Image (spheres, rainbow, N blue to C red):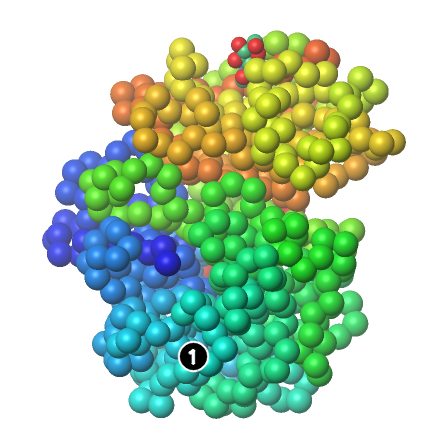
């Protein structure tokens, strides 16, 4: 399985410069005007993004790209390649890898790039060979002095790692970015189903061609046979700066991120020992079953990958956000799947959870702004945020919670199933402290609306904050997936007495960051009213206590250039340095 898909490049009108932001490009070939539900900021395209990296003043982004059509399965996958000077505007460089060799004839699947200490990048990727067997391959730049790194060479010694005999289900894929151990050997992680068990294997080698497997897997999850897209990266115990993927030693923890096939991304913070190639989780109590780990995002976001941005000393994570409408919609528009906005991430002070925040460059798209201070939204209240265009918007709100004592009691059975809790206690079910939050992409009559809200519960002697995104009324269209997404927000609401929410709206893509980026929910929505009417944005409160909105700031977002085929250059011009914005 793979999620890929792409565009029909045979259409000469095909290039659409959309949007932006994030990563991936894809060239749109719609002959008609773009539908209002199409995101403008993200990159369109395709699938899972593979090895992003920073090289010589430029960000490179690779992604699974299907030149033959928008569905997985029509034709074999290539790697698309786009570059950017600012992570916002992108130029499309064509394909970097195509399925032209015996070791990748059935498709160039996921992989990663590693930047060597001398600055040269190298790619490890999964090929499906002529017998559709998944194997690991290497590719090097044909001309390392080409600043755009357009052409890649796949040496004939590939595959560098054939499929091991104990791999079952033909699940052996997604090599990670490599890191250097203190013994001078490179290592990378790759997902493998080993005798029916979802495993993360470590390979060691000196030259990216000869690899030796560590006998013990780094991780094994008997409950989940097929895990994908492993990422193992260091985070500093203190502060928000990112670390090079090879960083190790005192003050450094490591994050193991795994994707449960086609579904959800999970992570665990811990310690990695590069002598034994073992990983010790910081939250042992969550056990070996990845589905008990923390989530990168509680919504529809998958296959996240991070890279170290040496230019701004930060770790940046991106992920694939696939469509949730029907296959015929994909065919009609000619592409499927986009990338999320890039997010900076770092370790929270608790040493256990990650904080994610849209990279500061997104703020260069901010245009008209409205600000509201000290609004009080009473029980049952609804307050419109007017004055900006809300189909492409960035909204930051801080809710004050003066009175927690009234909070409803949480039945412990809900702790394992926040989605069910949100489904049962939705935005229209009156609570005490909450539900309060935002209504986005709302039609004038509120027939269509998507809500993002919090609800605070009492649990033992403490409080639990639930964050929900409810899509059940997001569209009147049939055949669209309209779930409720949810997660708890791990913040000390008793101490803070407030909770923040930032929501980025980009047509069909809604990305929300609760509690300063500790809980993230991303969703696709396809409201029908946007074809003919404008959308509205509201604050609401259906708790019995009023809620004070100490501050709300909202901006409309401009449209970035995405997948320009002319590489000449606003795209390549570096943006001025700025301080890292923090929630
Ligand atoms: C708030 O509750 C009222 C009454 O149940 C309901 O009509 C309204 O839709 C609710 N608001 C939201 C955003 O669900």
Q: Quadrant of residue 117?
A: bottom right
Q: Quadrant of ligand 1?
A: top right
User: Residue at left 67%, top 25%?
Assistant: 455
- Name the element at disc 1: loop
Look at the image and tell me whether residue 577 can be seen.
no
Q: Is residue 457 depicted above or below 156 in this figure?
A: above
Q: Is residue 548 depicted above or below 65 in this figure?
A: above
Please rate how many residues cluster around mark 1, counting C-alpha atoms within 10 Å: few if below 14, some from 14 to 19, many from 20.
some
Q: How far from the left and from the top, in percent, is residue 20? A: 38, 47
**Which residue is at the far front?**
195
Q: How far from the left and from the top, in percent, is residue 229? A: 49, 63
Quadrant showing the N terminus: bottom left
Quadrant showing the C terminus: top right
Q: How far from the left and from the top, in percent, is residue 79? A: 32, 66
User: Residue at left 48%, top 90%?
Assistant: 210
User: Residue at left 72%, top 76%?
Assistant: 273
Location of mark 1 (residue): 163
Q: How far from the left and from the top, in percent, is residue 66? A: 26, 59
Q: Is mark 1 within 8 Å of ligand 1?
A: no
User: Residue at left 37%, top 39%?
Assistant: 324
Q: Is residue 160 left or right of residue 153?
A: right
Look at the image and tell me whether residue 314 can be seen.
yes
Q: Is residue 542 depicted above or below 152 in this figure?
A: above
């Amino acid at each position: 399985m793979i999620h890929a898909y792409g565009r029909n490049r045979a259409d000469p009108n095909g290039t659409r410069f959309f949007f932006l932001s994030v990563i991936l490009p894809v060239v749109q070939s719609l002959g008609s005007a773009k539908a209002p539900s199409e995101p403008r900021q993200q990159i369109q395209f395709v699938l899972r993004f593979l090895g992003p990296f920073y090289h010589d003043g430029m960000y490179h982004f690779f992604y699974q790209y299907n030149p033959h059509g928008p569905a997985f399965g029509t034709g074999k996958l290539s790697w698309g390649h786009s570059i950017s000077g600012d992570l916002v505007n992108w130029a499309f460089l064509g394909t970097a890898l195509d399925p032209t060799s015996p070791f990748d004839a059935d498709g160039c699947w996921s992989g990663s790039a590693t930047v060597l200490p001398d600055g040269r990048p190298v790619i490890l990727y999964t090929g499906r060979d002529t017998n559709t067997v998944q194997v690991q391959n290497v590719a090097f730049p044909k001309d390392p002095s080409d600043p755009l790194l357009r052409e890649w060479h796949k040496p004939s010694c590939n595959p560098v790692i054939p499929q091991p005999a104990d791999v079952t289900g033909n699940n052996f894929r997604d090599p990670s970015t490599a890191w250097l151990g203190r013994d001078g050997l490179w290592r990378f992680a790759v997902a493998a189903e080993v005798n029916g068990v979802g495993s993360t294997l470590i390979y060691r080698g000196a030259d990216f061609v000869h690899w030796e497997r560590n006998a013990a897997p780094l991780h094994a999850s008997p409950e989940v046979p097929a895990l994908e897209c492993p990422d193992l990266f260091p985070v500093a115990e203190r502060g928000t700066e990112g670390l090079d993927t090879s960083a190790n030693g005192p003050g450094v923890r490591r994050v193991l991120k795994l994707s449960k096939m086609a579904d959800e991304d999970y992570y665990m913070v811990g310690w990695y020992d590069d002598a034994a190639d073992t990983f010790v989780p910081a939250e042992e109590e969550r056990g070996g079953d990845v589905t008990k780990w923390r989530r990168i995002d509680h919504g529809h976001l998958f296959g996240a990958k991070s890279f170290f941005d040496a230019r701004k000393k930060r770790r940046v994570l991106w992920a694939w956000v696939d469509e949730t409408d029907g296959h015929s919609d994909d065919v009609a528009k000619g592409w499927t799947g986009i990338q999320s906005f890039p997010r900076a991430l770092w370790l929270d002070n608790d040493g256990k959870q990650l904080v994610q925040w849209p990279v500061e460059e997104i703020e260069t798209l901010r245009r008209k702004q409205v600000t509201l201070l000290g609004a009080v939204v009473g029980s049952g209240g609804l307050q419109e945020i007017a004055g900006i265009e809300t189909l492409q918007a960035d909204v930051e709100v801080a809710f004050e919670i003066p009175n927690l004592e009234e909070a409803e009691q949480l039945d412990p059975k809900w702790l394992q199933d926040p989605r069910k809790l949100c489904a049962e206690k939705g935005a229209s079910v009156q609570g005490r402290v909450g539900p309060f939050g935002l209504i986005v992409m709302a039609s004038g009559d509120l027939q269509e609306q998507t809500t993002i809200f919090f609800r605070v519960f009492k649990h033992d002697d403490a409080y639990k904050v639930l964050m929900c995104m409810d899509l059940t009324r997001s569209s009147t269209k049939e055949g669209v997936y309209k779930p409720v997404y949810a997660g708890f927000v791990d913040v000390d609401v008793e101490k803070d007495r407030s909770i923040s929410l930032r929501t980025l709206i980009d047509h069909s893509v809604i990305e929300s960051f609760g509690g300063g980026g500790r809980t993230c929910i991303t969703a696709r929505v396809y409201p029908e009213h946007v074809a003919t009417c404008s959308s509205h944005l509201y604050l609401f409160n259906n708790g019995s206590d009023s809620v004070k909105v100490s501050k709300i700031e909202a901006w409309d977002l401009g449209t970035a250039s995405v997948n320009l085929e002319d590489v000449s250059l606003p795209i390549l011009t570096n943006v001025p340095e700025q301080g890292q914005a923090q929630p």
